[in-house]
Image: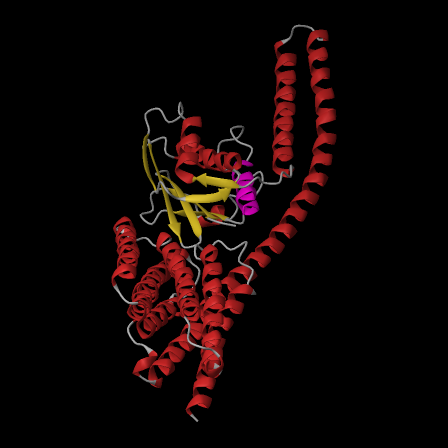
Amino acid sequence: MDMLLIFKIYLIYGLMFFAIFFCILFRDLHESQIRLAPTLPLLAAFGLIHGIHEWSELYLIIYQHEFASSAALTVFKLLKLWLSYIVLGIFAWRVLEITDWQNKSWIRLAVLVVLIIFVTNLFWRHDHENYAFFVHNTEMQIRLVFSLGASLLAGCALYNFASSLEQDGYGSSIPFKLTSIAFIGYGISTGLFTTDLGLWVLVLRTIFATALLVTLWHALRIFDIEKDKQKKATLHQSHQDAKLKELGELTSAVAHEIKTPISSAMMSCDLLSKQLPDNEDHQRQIDRIRYGLARAAEISQEVLSYAHYKPIERESVLLHEVIESALALNHYRLSGFKVDKVVSRDLQVMADKGLLEQVLSNLITNAIDASQNKNYIRIVGYQDKLNAIVRVIDLGSGMPISLIEKATQPFFTTKPKGEGTGMGLALSKQIITQHGGTLNLFNNEDGDGLTAEIQIPRKI
């Protein structure tokens, strides 16, 4: 009866670790932006190796009468136990790297000191203990250092990582926190208790292994959710790109057709100016025609820029650097202005640096025009979960709600006649939309000025 019960417990016990291996193996983590993703294959390897270890232990227990106790068999059992926990230790070390602990260097140093002491003690005991004691003490130390120690480190590091999940916008942190608790519980059950104390130790380990599998299964759902969002975003982006490409082809054809007669009319104005007698009224009318044609050519060029479809080239971009470049482009216009810039220096996005600089330069130009009386603009950049937020704030007169809704439409402008084509915000909105983000305008809460806000995904 005891042997049958042991068989069932070991069968379930090993199965839990094989299940951990497969639940990680069958997830596509290559495109994941979650920091834990690159370390999960190590946890899968631990599950596979530890599952093999536990089932091989069951095999040796069932057929123990067929195996003579030998030094080779003892060393084999010790090495396979050690190997599985070494992989767990590497996993814990890698998880430590993605935490935001301030004292990570001290923890690394402590781990290295413990490993040096373990190896030194191993060689010393080999020469000073008899074989039976040496093997027994080595197994206990492996369990203490590599099972308990690695599980505690992995559990605590996972708990810290889980706390950052909600802040990063990937969802609830509770499943990962429960996984970290299951890790710690499993480490205690394997590191502090041996099966010599009774069958309850094996049952306890099985319970914690099951808890580890169940909590990990729920925790890994964030990768499935992330994958679904990536697919939807890709599909939406492809539809958006197709629309922009089709619009660009149509508008470009129209704009080119318009530019040809405009050029011809401009040449005719030049010829007419030379042929007509020197008359002030004639010259005034020709200048008026020439000005109208120049405006039409300018608008035609703006339409071409707006309609021109260009695939964005994404790269890792530090937003504070892009903002500095945009400010440099407006250096002369900012003469006499106070620029209050509060931007996180480590805020990164995957974006087309040139296009993003164009958008920010345009928003800064608008803020300068609106704040001529107070000579002050404010730029704020920060992380909001999965998005990066940049706000360009002016101290102008603001804008009525009815006009804010039209502000990003092509050819809409509040500037005096002849000073703007009304394409700047429309083009900026198009670029941000192409990046999967949004451009929002709203009046400041104190009623003094307008805020232009960019929301752009930090990662794709």
Q: Quadrant of the N terminus?
A: bottom left
- Whether residue 381 sits left or right of residue 60 in the image: it is left
Q: Which x, y percent locates residue 28?
A: 56, 60
* 425 within the magenta span: yes
Pick out the residue farthest to the top.
Answer: 278
Q: Nearer the viewer, residue 283 or 333?
A: 333
Numbered range of the magenta stretch: 423-435
In the rendered image of this protein, does residue 380 appear above or below residue 106? above
Q: Nearer the viewer, residue 171 or 361?
A: 171
Q: Main secondary structure of the magenta part?
A: helix
In the rendered image of this protein, does residue 266 appear above or below residue 296? above
User: Which residue sits at x=47%, y=57%?
Assistant: 37
Q: Which x, y percent locates residue 430?
A: 56, 43
User: Which residue sits at x=61%, y=10%?
Assistant: 280
User: Which residue sits at x=35%, y=85%?
Assistant: 199
* 395 within the magenta span: no
Res 211 → quadrant: bottom left
Asked if residue 82 can be seen in this view, the reply is yes
